Amino acid sequence: MGKVAVGAAVVCAAAACAAVALVVRHRMRSSGKWGRVVAIVKEFEEQCRTPIGKLRQVADAMDVEMHAGLASEGGSKLKMLITYVDNLPSGDEKGLFYALDLGGTNFRTLRVHLGGKEKGVVKIESDEVSIPPHLMTGSSQELFDFIASKLAKFVSSEPEELHPPPGRQRELGFTFSFPVRQTSIASGNIIKWTKGFNIEDAVGEDVVGELTKSLEKIGLDMHVAALVNDTVGTVARARFSNQDVIAGVILGTGTNAAYVECAHAIPKWHGLLPKSGEMVINMEWGNFRSSHLPLTEYDHALDAESLNPGEQIFEKIISGMYLGEIVRRVLLKLAEEVDFFGDTVPPKLRIPFVLRTPDMSAIHQDTSSDLKVVGNKLKDILEINNTSLKMRKIVVELCDIVANRGARLSAAGIFGILKKIGRDTVKDGKKSVVALDGGLFEHYTKFRSSLESTLKELLGDEAAETIGIEQSNDGSGIGAALLAASHSQYLEVQES
């Protein structure tokens, strides 16, 4: 072999060795990198753990806070608001009732025909109206005049055979989903506006009074029989068809709970005890917090950067608004610290709330062998291409950790309510039903299954037999009309 050939062979061998070394280094680096990915995910999983003992501590803390909030105003992180709803639907209600649901940039008007025990809800008609942006920051009179005119138009389509007899007013249930200090079943002063509304001259005013002035101005003879919150509406909607309903929980974009309390168990109530002996309490449970809640660095950062730091901690770990955002924050850490998606951090991954909970739900519930849905979602939402199956599995695992924690804590909250009213153990065969509403509970199947199985685990087999979970839709619409019916000014007349 000549010198040139030997030289070439040496060069080739050296190149081959270098290539092998490069591959080995790359493998070592990628296995080291993968080890760090797994470590970050495992640490997150550990911090999110909700063993049954911890859930019992959360439920006990909820029970304690409920007592404190009922004892005095401002005595707890839970507001425990008295709703003045002391007469939930019995199922016997009959007639035509209206509802107005104002909770955002649209409002709904509903006409609900009730047929009592025999026929239940006979017919529902509704209309949805967009509120022009200038009215969201204008004067109170302008906003309520606009709402009244649309309500009058809706009433004008009422079938003739359903017109009220002379001298009888139509009755309306009004769902107003902004902070209000309620003063009676049909009055409450606006505390502040949220969701893009800012009508300064309405703050401190009675919202029912403002609406009534506008109705009178255009000659619409309508009596607001009940001012309600959507969670209370959920209880009413479910109670109409099932008298065992004792609480309602909304798990959607936000979260809240309301339940039926014994009136004499409310120390801060100074009025006459209601005839029914009951009072619905709006917990505003999104603001619950406890040292037992499993919070991570990602939750603390999300809270610190939110519009309401230190507030609504429970909501920020269990509701639909935030679950996808928590997953995004963990993925961002993986991308920044371990190059999880390659050498550069995908720009879209830096956008807060870019990963919505419905997308997270689709990722989590992908049953295809190659996790195709996960790959497509990462591509469509975050513009991340060419993800390996290994990477997709990590994304699914993160969704599982976050959804499971949220669902199990929701179950602990419900268990806390059941404890407070003594329905957590078997009592003389009494059945109790909790009504649930909201897109998170309705559409995120894995979340729902986890919540239901956790509640069963907390109750134990025997007590679990006596507790039911029921889906209840449209508390803010149908529920409000039902509360107008159960608090009708004509009830006394009918009963006497």
Image (cartoon, helix red, strand yellow):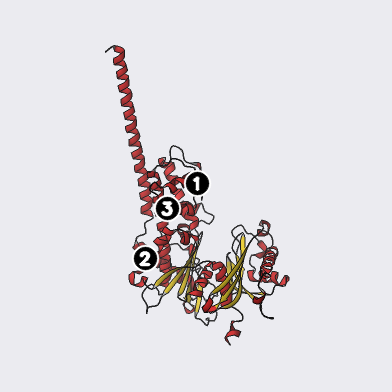
Per the rendering, the mark at residue 53 is none
Which badge, 2 or 3, is on the more N-terminal residue?
A: 2
Q: Is residue 137 left or right of residue 476?
A: right
How far apart marks 2 and 3 lie (CA) works out to: 27 Å
Q: Position of residue 427 (x, y in %)?
A: 37, 77
In the picture, the quarter occupied by the N terminus is: top left
The secondary structure type at the circle numbered 1 is: helix
Type of the residue with mark 2: Arg
Which badge, 3 or 1, is on the more N-terminal residue?
A: 3
The label nearer to you, 1 versus 2, is: 1
Q: Is residue 100 left or right of residue 385?
A: right
The residue lying furthest to the left in this view is 1
Residue drawn at 42 percent across, 40 percent down: 339
Per the rendering, the mark at residue 56 is 2
The secondary structure type at the circle numbered 2 is: helix
How far apart marks 1 and 2 lie (CA) works out to: 38 Å
Residue drawn at 35 percent across, 53 percent down: 46
Q: Position of residue 152 (x, y in %)?
A: 68, 69
Q: Is residue 76 visible?
A: no
Which badge, 1 or 2, is on the more N-terminal residue?
A: 2
Residue where numbered disc 1 is placed: 381
Residue where numbered disc 3 is placed: 364
Type of the residue with mark 3: His
The residue lying furthest to the top in this view is 2
Q: Position of residue 462 (x, y in %)?
A: 33, 72
Q: Position of residue 393 (x, y in %)?
A: 38, 47
The secondary structure type at the circle numbered 3 is: helix
- Relative height, residue 175 to residue 29 (above, below): below
User: Tag 1: Cα neighbours inside 10 Å, few (<14), some, or many (≥20)?
Assistant: some
How far apart marks 3 and 1 lie (CA) works out to: 15 Å
